[in-house]
Every structure is written in structure tokens, then in C-alpha cells.
Image (spheres, coloured by chain):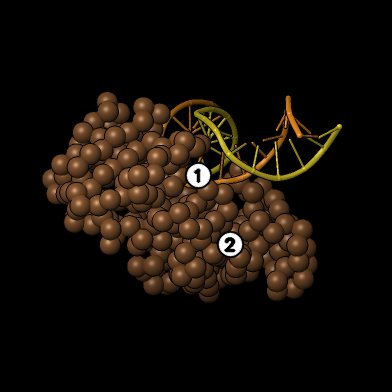
Chain colours: A brown, B yellow, C orange
Amino acid sequence: MPELPEVETVVRGLQPHVEGRLVTHARRSKLLRALPSRGKVARGLAQRRLDRLWRRGKYLLGDLDDGRTLLVHLGMSGQLVLEPLETGPRRHMHLALRFEGLEAELRFYDPRRFGRVALGGIDELAEWTGLGSLGLEPLEHDAGEIATAIRSRSKRLKALLLEGTAVAGAGNIYADESLFRAGLHPLRVASSLTRREAVCLAGELQGVLREAISGGGSTIGDYVRHDGRRGGFQEEHLVYGRAGRPCPRCGRKIRRLEVAGRGTHICTRCQRAPRKS
DNA sequence: ATGATTTCCTGTAGGC
DNA sequence: TGCCTACAGGAAATCA
């Protein structure tokens, strides 16, 4: 699933091709979950220049020359790819943008339709989506600050990381991977962490996110880079999707449990359960 | 308000 | 081989 490293990989891949270019045509499918919903997204994009492409958490953002911003969330199965104009679109294309002087089209595919698109001022986007309640950007703050934000919350670690309101960008993969690396159980309550544990978790989260970006992200399901290539970091996962296989640290069988409604992968020896629940 | 649960979706995996 | 069902999960909506 696309999480911070996957979105960052797509942003970096697209930047040199589309930044500074004028959008000549835009069209969207009626199935796309878009805001505003009255079909104004495509019209609002046409004849606007895309000044800057950036990322916040898992949201991909494109600043237009009229002060508005295009927001794209890839959801579960979203792909944002540049494809040659002569290549016909595949199934499940929900948004297509053409740029002046570019022989390729930026296409948003999303079979499961969990993705979202919005066009508005940054304040409107913050109001319409989770963008406004995102926590710290993990690679733009030091581990100490992130640790403080984590320790100020009373949720279970897994739920807190998935919510993204203390620290943004982790989804199921990187939540499990960072918790394993830090040796912390996903059911631990964030506010119960020692300072040392919280700093460790913050540091491991930053580490795994940076490594995943270097690896071009993790391709588990549908995620691909802007050019259709798969990511490579799935090969480096230590626990995610590895239930039944040996823990790379101690050899015990990795277990899969459910936390916060999500499949959660842990080593019960390396990640000690809290006293209660 | 806060936290927990449900909902939206369809491709894929597994069972028979 | 092919049909069928269960399952996966990010974030918004809904519930308690």
C-alpha cells in the first residue's frame, strides 16, 4: 500500500517531468471520489500551471499558479503514472492530465477506489481531508521532537502510528517494521513509553522510511513508481507479511495478530506484550 | 470530544 | 480448470 516512502518516490519521479508545466487538458471519471464533487476538479485544472509537486504524510500535493492546490491520495490501490499518449489507458483510470510539451499523460488509476482527489486552497484541503490533522512530518523533525509527540498520546502505538496525528506517514507496513525494529509491542500505550523507548521508536521510524525511499518504496499490491516500475523495499521487510517465518533477530516464528482492525506482524520474543490487554 | 467500529471497493488467493 | 468465498486495508463516516 502506498505510504510515505511510496508517495515520496512518486513525487520525486514526477517532479522533473511535470513541475512548471501547463496543464492543457484534464478529465476525470465520475467514479472518482473528488472534492468539490460537482465535477469542478477537471475544469479547475485545465490551463493552470503546476508550479510545485510535494508531499505531506501520504498526501501528494500539487500547487497551481492560481493559488489552489491539487491533492491526491492513493488510498490502497492508487497509481499515479506517466504513460505515453499513444498508449491507451488501462481499466480503472479515474483522472488524466495532459501537459504542454509533454508526450505523456499523467494518469491516476485506482481499481478499489479508496483513493481521493481534491482541488482547493490549502486551508480548504485541510478542512476537507485528514491533511489538517496530520502530525509531525517524520523526516523534517528530530527524533526527540517526534518522541515527545508520541508520548503525549494515550493510544496504543499501532493505532497511533496508523492515525498519523502524532507523526504522519506510516501505514501498516512501516508501523509494523518500525515497532519491530524498536522492540516495542503494538499494544503498548504511547504515553507509557519511557523517553528512551520513544526516542528509539522515532529513530527507527525515520530509519525505515529513509531506507524505503532509497529502495523506491515497497510493492505489495498495486503500488508502482511513476514510470510503472515496482519498488524494491518489500525484499527488506523484517516482519510485515512474514507471519510463520523466523524472526530475523531471534528466530522465533513471526506471529500475525489484529490490532486496531489491521493485520499486525510481530515477534513475541523481541516485542514484549504490555501487562494488560 | 474522544476513541472504537464500520464502511467503502475489487483483485487476488485459497479451497474444493 | 473454474467457480466461489474470504480477505486485504487508508481514511472518512458513524457509533457509543
* Crowding at mark 2 (Cα within 10 Å: few <14, some 14-19, many 20+): some
The quadrant where residue A273 appears: bottom right
Q: Is residue A19 above or below residue A201?
A: above
Q: Which mark is residue A234?
A: 2
A234 with respect to A60 (left or right): right
Same chain shared by disc 1 and disc 2: yes
The quadrant where residue A149 appears: bottom left
Q: Residue furthest left?
A: A66
Front residue of this view, candidates A37 and C16: A37
Q: Residue at x 70, y 74 (%)?
A: A249
Front residue of this view, candidates A245 and B10: B10
The quadrant where residue A43 appears: top left
Name the residue type under label 1: Met
Q: Residue at x 47, y 36 (%)?
A: A91
Residue denoted by label 1: A76
Query: Where residue A112 sits: x, y (%)?
Result: 51, 36
| Earlier sequence position, callout 1 versus callout 2 | 1
Question: Which chain is indicated by disc 1?
Answer: A
Distance (Cα) linking label 1 and label 2: 16 Å
Count of numbered circles on the image: 2
A50 with respect to A230 (left or right): left
Name the residue type under label 2: Gln
Q: Is residue A249 above or below residue A10?
A: below
Q: Residue at x 20, y 45 (%)?
A: A23
Q: Is residue A198 above or below residue B10?
A: below
Question: Which chain is indicated by disc 2?
Answer: A
Query: Where residue C10 sits: x, y (%)?
Result: 48, 47
Secondary-structure class at tag 1? loop
Front residue of this view, candidates A215 and A182: A215
Asked if residue A3 shows in the view, the reply is: no
A218 with respect to A52 (left or right): right
